[in-house]
Image (cartoon, rainbow, N blue to C red):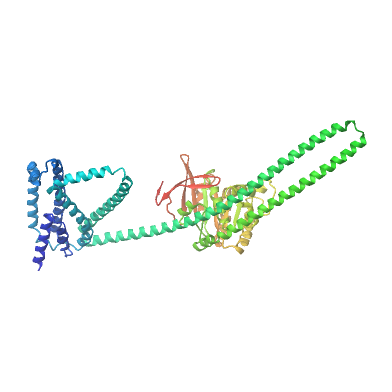
Amino acid sequence: MEDDEGNKGSDSLRKWLKGDDSSLVSWLSGGTQAAEGEESFELRKRIMQLEDEKAQLTEELEAAREGAAGTHATLDDVLDARPSLRTRLERFRMRMDGLSNKLGSVAEQLCPETQKYIEVQKRIEALDSEMRGVLRNLLERPEALDQHAKEAAEVENKMEEETPALEAKMAEIEADVENKRIADAMTKEKLELVEMGREDADAFLDQRMKELENWKEERITLERENQRLRVQLEDRSEELNRLRSLLRYKEEELVRREEDLIYRERMVDEEQKRFASEKAQVDGIDELKMQKRLEDLRGEVTNKEEEIRKKESYLNSKMEELRRRELDLIEEEIDVREEDRLAEVSAKKAHTGNQRLNDLLLGGYPFGSSLLAYGPSFVGKEILVNEFVAEGLVKGVPALWVLTDSSPTEIRAEMERIISGYEEYEKLGLVKYVDAYSRTVDEPGDDPYTAYIESPESHDAISAAVDKIAAEFKQDHDYYRLGFRSLSNLIAYSDINKAFRFLSPFVGKRKKDRAVSLLVLEKGLQQEQEIQMLSMIVDGMLDFKIDNQRNFFAVKGITDVQTRNDVRYTWSDRGLNIGSFTLDHIK
């Protein structure tokens, strides 16, 4: 029985060597043994070499036939004109005969992995067989060349009219070529798999299956992210349209006020001219008439002043109406973004306010985390904090500022450039300040949303004020966001040990509240040992730096991130523009 199978395998391979490509599949599929000997391996290697030589001979025959196409030469004529080519064909046939004699002894030594290669190879062999059939017809029927030439001439005459269709066909052909290139790569890979042992092949296939699963998961993640970004883009478009409508209304109101001011100035000028004219006329009138005229003028001035006061009252009422409309828009925006806020609470991660940074951190800052924004001056780290606070306000998440180097007025001016209607969020009770700066520079302390502290070294007072405001926030909200500007001033007013004793429980309370805190720290004011002490308290750091006039930052600690390498960025007073990144490679 085994001898019969070996003879069948030999016959199949002999047919392949004579041009029947399907016989190679039959011969390969006959190998059913799990082990593969050295003789079988060498035999397949020689088969591959003969296949390459067969393709090369076919190409040379075609080239020789094309060179003799004008004479309608037959295949024998071509071989007579090229003795060396005939010699190579005869030598090729002799090697085929020698190879056929060894087939019986190795037919049963092929490993089952060959079957996996066969399924892929069938498609390629069918196409290759078809190609050889066309070549054979061309060699045996030279008269077909003239007909093809005529047809080509007709096609060439229609090329200009059919250019669009040809371009589309070319695109399809290129796609097909790419698919075939991929199939060829897969074929080579399958061949390598055939030559491996069973254990290596299984390991190789397992690795490829894992890579495929990873690619599928990555694709699903990207599709979900794309869908989320589309929804966010639609929300941003709607928000932009609302803001544009509000801006147009404000611009129209401003134009009306300017027109009113111009009118009032014109009226004052006319009154002054008339008064001067009347004064000139009364120079010759007696004192009694002058007094009467003066009283009339005073009455007219009083009427004009009353008219102006009415117009000012009207403008004030319009401005108040505008503020109410803006407040209504903000409240509607908060209601619209309620779903986003609930998604944050569910994911236990707060959006950073910057989509690129949010992607880098795989969703945002974890709830309850305290992070250092550490870097030199003028690199935009304060803008990062402002973006974070603003993104929370539009979703109704309250913000608490602890200030040691700026006043609430300065923070308000910065935030107005990032978020429209910032003062209206204050009126809604979503913004509070603990100000340990204004009293040190003798600024008046009359802001209704601020708790004033005498100086940055009053640690107990700062902690008590923050705890009080945090308790108020926690009554109506799931969590809050805290911006601390800055730790450097706090340390400068005392020392690192006192600051450490203050910050340790301070950060612990924020973690208990599930608040997300960003603490600004200036580079160059503290020693490395002090920075290490502060790092022990917080959960992570955004490390800003400047290199060759370009800005970079790196994520340390915090959470899982796409990369911890330096990421390039630019910034303005409206936000940070973060460069692209892919895993461990930064562009």
User: Foreground residue, 95 or 456?
Assistant: 95
Question: At which x and y percent is residue 505?
Answer: 57, 59
Q: Quadrant of the N terminus?
A: bottom left
Residue 371 left/right relative to 271: left
Residue 265 left/right relative to 351: right
Please tell me in which quadrant of the rendered image residue 265 appears.
Answer: top right
Total tally of numbered discs in the picture: 0
User: Foreground residue, 573 or 272?
Assistant: 272
Q: Can residue 242 be seen?
A: yes
Residue 260 left/right relative to 211: right
Q: What residue appears at the point 61 percent right and 63 percent down from the top-left corner?
A: 476
Q: What residue appears at the point 41 percent right and 58 percent down from the top-left corner?
A: 221
Q: State whether residue 8 is above or below residue 280.
A: below
Residue 358 left/right relative to 325: left
Question: At which x and y percent is residue 197?
Answer: 21, 60
Question: At which x and y percent is residue 93?
Answer: 8, 51
Q: State whether residue 11 is above or below residue 545.
A: below
Question: At which x and y percent is residue 59?
Answer: 16, 46
Q: Can residue 530 be seen?
A: no
